Image (cartoon, rainbow, N blue to C red):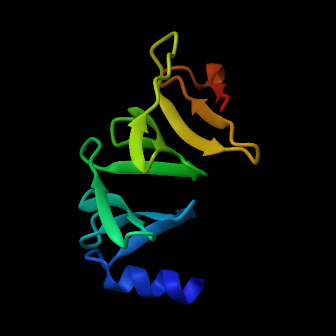
Amino acid sequence: MIQRLYTNYRTSSKHYPGYAKYSNGKIFAIHFVNNDWTMQDFGYLDLKTNEYHSLEHGQYISTFKTYNDRLAILDDEHHFYFYEFQDDELVPLEVTIMEEINPMHIFFDPEGHLIIYIDEEDDTDHSRVGVIYP
């Protein structure tokens, strides 16, 4: 399996993947052009079709997490994006957040709940954690 993933990535059009994550038949990665973090292409390689799909968000991607068919992204401006693959199409999931937030970190727990760490820029004593259920 590892040899197949490596071979697929070497034959894709993107040669410098970083922070690669495998999830449900797809390899997601931030592809760097050079040593500059802001010079990147974010996307995924679909192993079933061997096609690469580029996804643009902000100037660059700060972090991303995957769980099964779900994808969560934070861009350089701390904008939050949440997607799910439905019938092999990436569909945005509507998430209603009741107040202005500054998400700093995102991750999935072992059951697939998306956890968002929210930092108050001016008052770190009031940082919070939010959970989005599947």
Determine whether, in the image, residue 131 is placed left or right of residue 44: right
The image quarter in which residue 45 lies: bottom left
Q: Nearer the viewer, residue 98 or 127?
A: 98
Determine whether, in the image, residue 43 is placed left or right of residue 133: left
Q: Quadrant of the C terminus?
A: top right
Residue at the far front in the pictured view: 87
Residue at the far top in the pictured view: 98
Q: Taking 68 as reference, is 32 above or below it? A: below
Q: Which percent across, then down, holds residue 30?
A: 38, 62
The image quarter in which residue 92 lies: top left
Q: Nearer the viewer, residue 89 or 19?
A: 89
| Residue that appears at 40% across and 37% down | 91
**Does the image show residue 107?**
yes
Determine whether, in the image, residue 107 is placed left or right of residue 53: right
Q: Taking 103 as reference, is 98 above or below it? A: above
Q: Quadrant of the N terminus?
A: bottom right
| Residue that appears at 55% across and 65% down | 22
| Residue that appears at 59% across and 25% down | 124
Q: Taking 125 as reference, is 44 above or below it? A: below
Q: Which percent across, then down, holds residue 133?
A: 67, 29
**Does the image show residue 37?**
no
The image quarter in which residue 90 lies: top left
Q: Which percent across, then down, holds residue 73?
A: 44, 43
Q: Taking 119 as reference, is 13 above or below it? A: below
Determine whether, in the image, residue 49 is placed left or right of residue 25: left
